C-alpha cells in the first residue's frame, strides 16, 4: 500500500516510516504543506497520514487540498490531546508562515462528515493502535481488515490470536479460551451476551458440561483485563465490554 506521511516532526516521521516500511508499505514523507501538495499531484496514494502540526496551512487550504485527493484515498488525521478541548473557530485567512494550524473539533467533525478525513487518531498512540486504524481504513476492497480489530484502546490481532491494550508492546497473556471469550465480547460491539452464548461460542454446541471451565475462564479473563485497565460489565448472567 502507498502511504504519504504529512508529518513535520522529523523524529516522529522516521519512527512512523520505519514502522510502516516494516509492514511492507511504500512510504513517502512530506514535512511541509507545499511538499504534501506536490506529492498528491505527482502520485496516487492509498492513505494520507496527516499530522495536525503541519505548519503554514489554513483550514480552508487544508479542506481544498484534501478534496483534491483521489476518490479511493483514505485520510488518517493525527491530533494532539488539546484537539478535544479546542474551541477555536475555523480560520478564514491563510496562516502566517511558520504558524501552527490546529483544527477545532467542530471543523474536524465537519470534514469527517464530508469524508475529507476518514479517521482521527489522538497522540500519543502505540504501534498496535496505528496499524489497527490503518487496517480498518484500508482493508481489502475498502472493507474492514480481517486481521485486526480495534475497540477503544484494545487491539486484537486475529491472525495471531493476541490482544494488546493501550501503548502496551506485549500482548495481554491470555489462554486460548480467554482470547476466544474476549474476541466474542468485542465482536458483540457493546451488546450484552449471556453466559450460555459465551459458552457456546468458546466450547461449541452441546457442551454444557463445560460450564465450570467457562466460569473459570470468565474469572481469569476479568482479572487480567482489570489489571490492563479494561473492564467487563456483568448484569446477572449477561456480560459485555463497552
Image (spheres, rainbow, N blue to C red):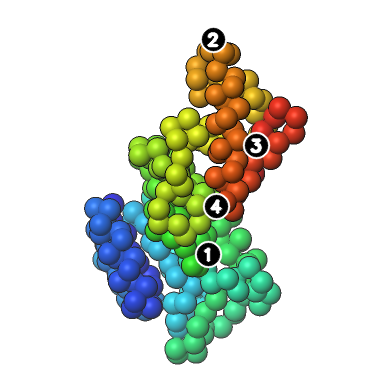
Q: Which residue is mark 4?
A: 228
SS at badge 1 = strand
Q: Are marks 3 and 2 in contact (CB under 8 Å)?
A: no
Residue named by callout 1: 122
| Residue projecting furthest to the bottom | 97
Place of residue 88 in the rendered image (x, y in percent of width and height, measured from the top left): 66, 77
Residue underneath mark 2: 206
Please tell me how crowded label 2 is: few (under 14), some (14-19), or many (20+) other residues with Cα within 10 Å: few
Q: Nearer the viewer, mark 3 or mark 4?
A: 4
Q: Gap in Å between the C-alphas at discs 2 and 1? A: 45 Å
Q: Tell me how far mark 3 sits from mark 2, CA to CA.
A: 23 Å
Q: CA distance from mark 3 to mark 4?
A: 17 Å
CA separation in Å, label 3 and label 1 = 25 Å
Mark 3 vs mark 1: which is more N-terminal? Answer: 1
Marks 3, 1: nearer the viewer? 3
Distance, label 4 to label 2, CA atoms, is: 33 Å
Q: Secondary structure at mark 2?
A: loop
Q: Which mark, by number, is residue 240?
A: 3
In primary-sequence order, the first of circles 2 and 1 is 1
Q: Is residue 163 above or below residue 45?
A: above
Q: Answer yes or no: do the residues labelled 3 and 1 have beta carbons within 8 Å?
A: no
> 150 left or right of 36?
right
Mark 3 closeness class: few <14, some 14–19, many ≥20 residues within 10 Å: many
Amino acid at each position: 500500500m502507498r502511504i504519504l506521511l504529512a508529518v513535520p516532526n522529523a523524529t516522529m516521521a522516521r519512527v512512523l516510516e520505519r514502522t510502516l516500511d516494516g509492514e511492507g508499505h511504500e512510504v513517502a514523507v512530506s514535512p511541509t504543506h507545499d511538499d504534501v501538495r506536490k506529492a498528491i499531484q505527482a502520485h496516487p496514494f492509498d492513505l494520507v497520514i496527516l499530522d495536525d502540526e503541519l505548519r503554514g496551512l489554513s483550514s480552508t487550504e487544508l479542506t481544498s487540498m484534501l478534496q483534491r485527493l483521489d476518490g479511493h484515498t483514505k485520510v488518517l488525521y493525527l491530533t494532539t490531546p488539546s484537539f478535544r478541548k479546542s474551541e477555536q473557530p475555523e480560520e478564514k485567512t491563510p496562516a502566517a508562515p511558520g504558524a501552527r494550524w490546529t483544527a477545532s473539533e467542530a471543523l474536524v467533525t465537519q470534514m469527517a462528515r464530508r469524508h475529507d478525513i476518514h479517521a482521527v487518531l489522538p497522540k500519543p498512540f502505540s504501534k498496535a493502535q496505528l496499524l489497527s486504524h490503518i487496517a480498518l481504513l484500508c482493508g481489502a476492497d475498502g472493507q474492514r481488515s480481517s486481521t485486526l480489530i480495534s475497540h477503544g484502546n484494545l487491539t486484537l490481532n486475529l491472525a495471531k490470536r493476541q490482544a494488546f491494550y493501550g501503548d502496551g508492546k506485549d500482548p495481554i497473556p491470555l489462554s486460548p479460551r480467554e482470547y476466544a471469550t474476549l474476541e466474542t465480547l468485542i465482536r458483540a460491539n457493546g451488546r450484552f451476551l449471556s453466559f450460555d452464548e459465551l459458552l457456546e461460542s468458546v466450547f461449541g454446541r452441546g457442551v454444557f458440561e463445560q460450564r465450570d471451565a467457562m466460569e473459570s475462564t470468565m474469572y481469569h479473563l476479568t482479572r487480567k483485563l482489570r489489571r490492563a485497565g479494561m473492564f467487563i460489565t456483568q448484569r446477572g448472567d449477561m456480560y459485555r465490554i463497552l
